[in-house]
Structure formats: C-alpha cells, structure tokens
Amino acid sequence: MNQNRTPLLDAIRSLIDTHPAYFRIPGHRLERGISSRWTDRVGTEIFAYDVTETPLTDDLHSPEGAILEAEALLAALYGADRSFFLVNGTTCGNEAMLLSAALAGEKVLLARNAHKSALMGLILSGASPAYVMPEVLTAWGIQGGVTPAAVRRAFEAHPECRALFLVSPSYYGLSSDLVQIAEICHANGALLLVDEAHGGHVYFHGALPAGALAAGADMCVQSMHKVTGALTQSSVLHIKSHGIGEDILARVADNLRLVQSTSPSYLLMASLDCARYELAARGEEMMRRALALAASARAAVCALPGFRCMDRNVTGVSGIAGVDGTRLVISAKELGLTGFALEALLFEKYAVNVELADYENVLAIVTYANEEEELERLICACADISRAYAGQTGAGKTGQDVFLPFPPLPRQAATPRQAYFARVQETPWQEAAGRISAQLIAPYPPGIPVVYPGEEISREAWAYIECFRKHGRHIHGLETDTVRVLCDTGAL
C-alpha cells in the first residue's frame, strides 16, 4: 500500500476547503468560536480540523472511506489483519480485547501486574480471572517479565482459559518472551492478548525488543501518543489471526463501539494518521536517533559516582527477554536518594521532568524528538546531585528495600464484576484479615497486586501488605487506614 498517503488528514482538509456553511457539531464552527484567550496564544488553524462525521470525513464506528483507508494503511505497516483507531486511549482497547476474548463466566489468564484497565475489562465482561505471576527484578526493585514456564503451569492448572492477557514491554521497557508464550497459548487453543501500550515503536529497529504481532500475538493495543508522535489519548488496536478464536476476533469492532466515545475526536484520529505516515517514512531513522541519544546519556550517568543506569545486562534474568534501549532507568540509591527524592530534585532545582519515580529509580523516556541539549541537562543535573551528595553514600538505607517473599495468591471468592457490584463497607485495616476485598491493593514498587477485588485478604496477604504500610511505603488501594470489603459473600 502507498504509505505516503494520509487519507484522513486529507479528507478533513478537503472539507475545510469547501468553506462550508457549518451546522454540525462541534459548536465552535471550525476555528471561529474558540476563546480568544486560547487562540491569541496558539493561533486558530488547528481548530478547523476539529470536525465530526461528514460525507468526506467518514465515521469511526462504521468506517467506509477515509478512516477505513487510514486504518488499512496502519494494519499494513504493522503486519496486522485489521487495525482500529482508538480515541479513548489504550484503556478502551484493553477493555475491548477482554470483552471479546471471554464471555461472562468464562475464564482468562491475566498477568498479575496487568494495568488496571484489564480489571475494568473483567468487570465489564464478567469473565473470571486466573493469574500468572511476573518475576521481580530485585536488583532494581521493579517487575520483570512473565516466563514461558509460568504460563505453561498456569494453563496446566486452568486449561479452560480462553486467553492470556499480559503487558509487554513494561513501563520500564522490559519485555517477556512473547514468541514462546504465543506458542504455548495457541497450543492450548487460547488467544494471546498483549497490552503493548509502551511498544508501538519497537517494530522499527532491530535493536528494540520484538513487537507483539511479529512474535505471535492475536491482539495487541498500542498507545501511539507515548513515543510515536500522536496526540495524547490516541491509541490503536491490532488483530492478527492465527486460526484461533475467529468468532472472538469478529466481536472486537462491536465491543469497541461499546467502550469508545460516540463523538470521536478527529484531531486525535488525524494525529494517528500522521504518526503512521512518519513511522512508515522514517521509522528506523527515528528509532536510531532515540537509541543513540539514550545510549550516550546512559553511559554518562553510569560514570557518575553514586548513580547507575539499567542496561541490557538484565536480559535473560527475571523473565526478561528484551530491553527497550530508549528508556533510561536511573538510580541514585547509593547516594541515599529514593527515586521520589531524585525526581523532586531534578524537577525543582533543574527543571528536568522525568516520566515517573519509584522507591529506587526514576524513568526518563527518550524519543526521536528529544534534543541533545535536553539529555545534557539531565546528565549535568545528575552530575551536580552526585557532587552534592558525595560522602552520604548509604544514607537513608533502612532495610525497606529488601523484598519480602510474595504471599500465595489469595482465595477468589467472587469475580471482579461480582465484587464491583456487591454491597460494600469500609472496615479498619487492622480488622481486614479474612474479609473479601472490594478493591485492588498493590504495594508500589513492585506494583504487583497482592489482592484483587473479590479475593480474600488472607492472613499472609495482610501481613505482607502491613509490612509495607508500617514502613510508610506507597500502596495503591490503601491510602487510608480503612479498606472496602464485601458486606455479604453469601449472596454472591
């Protein structure tokens, strides 16, 4: 296909060029009705592209023209059978994959570190989850990958599962062995669904981890806004059939209508069309630049006293099959600085913004659009911090960084959907052991949920969480001294 085309962008331009008498939504009438406080700062032309469905601009929920052609170009670029534009982010794509993969009462395997949108998909679908545990990369205090051996054991224990849902690559750029995992899924008659939110770019350079579709995934979702130039909230869903679950794959379009806005943003969709065009035209060049910028910064940071930066030497351990070299995972732990403290210093003193922080690291995402000067500012800031905290090595170490043995997975008394729609009550955390949780509880890091909605807060799980709580560690789902639990499990 001719990847030099941008059919949706061109269709919107064609509409604008008709100088229409416009009586459709949105009400700002192309660029004319936007607040001058905004247009005085950014100009007006972009707002003319914020249109709706017209005979020229097609319909996302039933595409026949420009959108269908743009999605076909996207599918051809990624080697998919069918691709869909998403305007509600990767969240809605994950929901649609799970809604399509399993009906109410059917079972799916879920990596225990899945994004919370997977939990939303389970609540919507009514499917029952069985879990597969990712490894933990203890040297960095973060989650690693899911091993093929763990997937094989999970299917042996739950052969009725219709699909496996996992994240690869992770936020930190660590990927699982998707080739082997796909083979195991297909041998068990199950689909492989991949949350590839952080991997839309990996298809365009051989030094990056293998893409999910190329590795054998049946469906994957990518956040194209994260590193490939689309606007925030712009994502895509790809399907590649391997002869399994054709009836399931046919449901995806219907389920996307369920979870996507009926007023899709044409700005977001045009940005997807243009991001695809850029990747097709110069994707390898873009990734080469990002990798080179990141590699240079990584070497410079690693040379600083008290700093370290993750590299590819973690490949082959903790279930990690590949590392995205455009991600800089930086630790100043040897200087006594948590990732949170390092993030605050970088932002407040040096105006260096990183993507996230945890107890041990900060994460900086490098893309083709970064300038060398920005990487130099990061390096100089780290060098200044290294000098300032020299001689304080070991300060602040309290033993909190030692990982406890992860408790056995709790008993599942209800599905996430049942727990979500059940009557709940707040109960003091000190009295929560033995109750059925109505919420997810996950100490961070490593970010792996200890308890999912519908699971018993076992004494082992309670003790594990309590250890984090006593030390003041951050816990998703337990921000206060109370927890939501089910009132009556006998009614389930």
Image: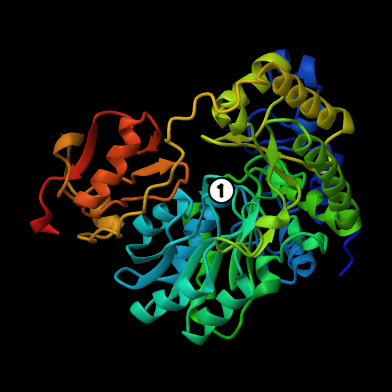
Closer to us: 241 or 307: 307
**Residue 108 screen position, x and y as percent:** 40, 70
State how many labels appear. Answer: 1
* Res. 24 image quadrant: top right
**Residue 30 screen position, x and y as percent:** 74, 32
Quickly name the residue at label 1: 139
Closer to us: 267 or 124: 124
The image quadrant where one finds the N terminus is bottom right
The image quadrant where one finds the C terminus is bottom left
Residue 270 appears in the picture as rendered: no
User: Residue at coordinates 34% horizontally, 50% vertically from top-left?
Assistant: 450
Residue 330 appears in the picture as rendered: yes
**Residue 266 screen position, x and y as percent:** 69, 44
User: Residue at coordinates 91% horizontally, 59% vertically from top-left?
Assistant: 4
Vertical position of residue 291 compared to residue 429: above or below: below
Q: What is the three-letter code of the residue carrying label 1? A: Ala
**Residue 281 screen position, x and y as percent:** 91, 57
* Res. 341 image quadrant: top right
Residue furthest toward the front?
391
